[in-house]
Image (cartoon, coloured by chain):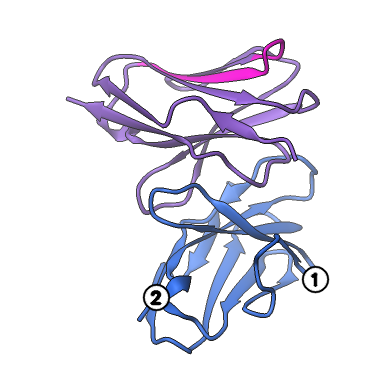
Chain colours: A blue, B purple
Amino acid sequence: GAVVSQHPSWVICKSGTSVKIECRSLDFQATTMFWYRQFPKQSLMLMATSNEGSKATYEQGVEKDKFLINHASLTLSTLTVTSAHPEDSSFYICSARDWTPGETQYFGPGTRLLVL
Amino acid sequence: GESVGLHLPTLSVQEGDNSIINCAYSNSASDYFIWYKQESGKGPQFIIDIRSNMDKRQGQRVTVLLNKTVKHLSLQIAATQPGDSAVYFCAESQALNFGKGTSLLVTP
């Protein structure tokens, strides 16, 4: 149980294009999903928190117009990197938590983005 | 806000030895802690958790110890194997940010 998937697992795109990453909770309903970014040899950095049916809450320094997050259902959240640039190249990881506050986050396998 | 931190950035152990990874936290109100393992190129994987009403919890080859007095928890891995090589993070239940983690390297 508690499986979270991400798609795609990796993506290469040209600078200026937009990329959408999907995060799905496969066997539980995720009222809250989190998006993280991780650069090589660094820790996970929280980008935003999304609750189903409401607007995402972004961490300081994260541009909400650049990183569009949609959490339209209890099993799916999407992150769209708009007008991607090489500095957006990173490992993007989502996690999901069920309705019980304070319980464990379950992480997806990550999506590696390379912007040329 | 208060955060969870890791004592050592790297730990090298020989295959078969026991490993101990330490973590300090600052929020005395924290009541639930989780250890995650992240292998290279993968997302973090849940290993074991512990609630504040316990001071020890055991899993398969792993044990988590919680010392609320000094706000410290540790992850013990018995008979460490090459497949245990990874970065280990501890987290509070509400923690949405992680420390740097401890990189465990298992040598033959």
Q: The C terminus of chain A appears in which quarter of the rendering?
A: bottom left
Q: Is residue B88 above or below residue A83?
A: above
**Mark carried by residue A11:** 2
Give the CA separation, mark 2 to mark 1.
26 Å
Viewer-nearest residue: B29 or B46: B29
**Mark carried by residue A55:** 1
**Residue at the image position 24 percent from the left and 19 percent from the top:** B14
User: Which of marks 1 and 2 precedes in the sequence?
Assistant: 2
Q: In this view, does A24 lie to the left or right of A33?
A: left
Q: In this view, does B35 lie to the left or right of A62?
A: left
Q: What residue type is labelled 2?
A: Val
**Hey, which quadrant is residue A51 in on the image?**
bottom right
Viewer-nearest residue: A40 or B40: A40
Residue B107 colored magenta? no
Mark 1: which secondary structure? loop
* Residue A30 visible: no
| Spot occupied by residue A21 in the image (x, y as percentages of width and height) | 53, 73
Chain to which the residue tagged by mark 1 belongs: A
**Residue at the image position 81 percent from the left and 26 percent from the top:** B29
Q: What residue type is labelled 1?
A: Lys
Chain to which the residue tagged by mark 2 belongs: A
